[in-house]
Amino acid sequence: MKVDLFNFDLPQCFIADRPASPRDSARLLDLTGESFADRIMRDLPDLLQPGDLLIGNNTKVIPARLDGVRGEVKIEATLHMRTADNEWLAFAKPGKRLKPGSLIDFADDFFAEVVEKREGGDIRLRFNCGGEKLFQCLEKYGRMPLPPYIQRKRDDELTASDRENYQTVFAKEEGAVAAPTAGLHFTPELFQTLEKRGVGFETVTLHVGAGTFLPVKVDNTEDHKMHAEWGTISQHTVDRINATRMAGGRIIAIGTTSLRLLESAATAPGQIHPFAGETEIFITPGYQFKIVDLLLTNFHLPRSTLFMLVSAFAGLEKMHAVYEHAKEKGYRFYSYGDACLLKREEI
């Protein structure tokens, strides 16, 4: 498909640079009925049915943006996927001067060697420490890898607020360099209301990579190469999904990352198995969804793989109408923005 089909105009004024406070006061565009309905996240329990099952991504964002030097040259490295105990793939700026064997110093006791330059423009870094020690160094020296459209004037402002805000309340497994942003709208109080409603909750893990922010630079979707991300789905979660479907309940993915992992683990309509490994699944219109019935998601970038995914889920023409409605009503877009609840289009 032509990538231009997924383009739309979005003035800067619609891009949120701060999250809603409290989180569950974010606006929610309800698209599960015959017409659009403007609500807030606290209304979500009323839109779901007893026996439904929410699936969230419990990945935890790490401070994956590092400022270093190679000689006299300042280097910014953004880690995006772990490949070994002490190795990560990273995007580096400026990257042209970096060659295999180059050393980047991030602190007196923390440095990395460039061991590979890859065709996609990223590099493989081997750090001087691994395991828990590496995560401790990232916590000490790294910055939260906010998307490029969220601007901060001071690093101390970012450290003070975004380390908490850019993390879901159910984050557990360290390894993401981007937040599963639909999950940012949940609070303990909202989960209590959902539980009283009879709605279940389980988690999967997909370590979201920085590749999620990369623009689609090709003219045709068939020519786009997705970056791999590592994920896992436990037998317990699979059993819960299967039991929900058997009882007539619906599966609601909290965010595109949860949906992508669930669909990666599906083998046939309604059939899913435990999963552990990388996924490069790229969902565009025409894809036959196998597991997910409803999708809770934020509003995404034009020409992005995420807008392509939601267009596949709910229909391209409908999603263009949804986004025009959202702009008309003043919804906030992107990572810290508002949400919409989509129903799968029957093909």
Image (tube, grey):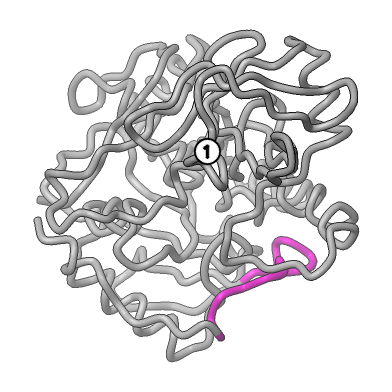
Expressed as whole percent of the image width and height from the top left, the position of residue 49 reads: 47, 49
Q: Is residue 274 left or right of residue 314?
A: right
Q: Is residue 56 left or right of residue 246?
A: right
Query: Magenta residues, as a range?
Result: 13-26
* Amino acid at the residue labelled 1: Arg
Q: Is residue 324 left or right of residue 317?
A: right
Residue 20 shown in magenta: yes
Q: Main secondary structure of the magenta part?
A: loop
What residue do we see at 85% from left, 23% from top? 136
For label 1, the crowd category at 10 Å Cα-Cα, with few meaning under 14, some 14 to 19 and many 20 or more, is few
Q: Which residue is mark 1?
A: 97
Question: Can the viewer see residue 170 in this picture?
Answer: no
Q: Is residue 1 left or right of residue 98?
A: left
What residue do we see at 52% from left, 26% from top? 89
- Establish if 138 lies above or below 192: above
Residue nearer the viewer, 101 or 259? 101
What residue do we see at 84% from left, 58% from top? 155
Residue ranking furthest to the front: 72
- Residue 201 position by quadrant: top right
What residue do we see at 34% from left, 68% from top? 302
Which image quarter holds the N terminus? Answer: bottom left
Residue nearer the viewer, 335 or 223? 223
- Establish if 48 lies above or below 318: above
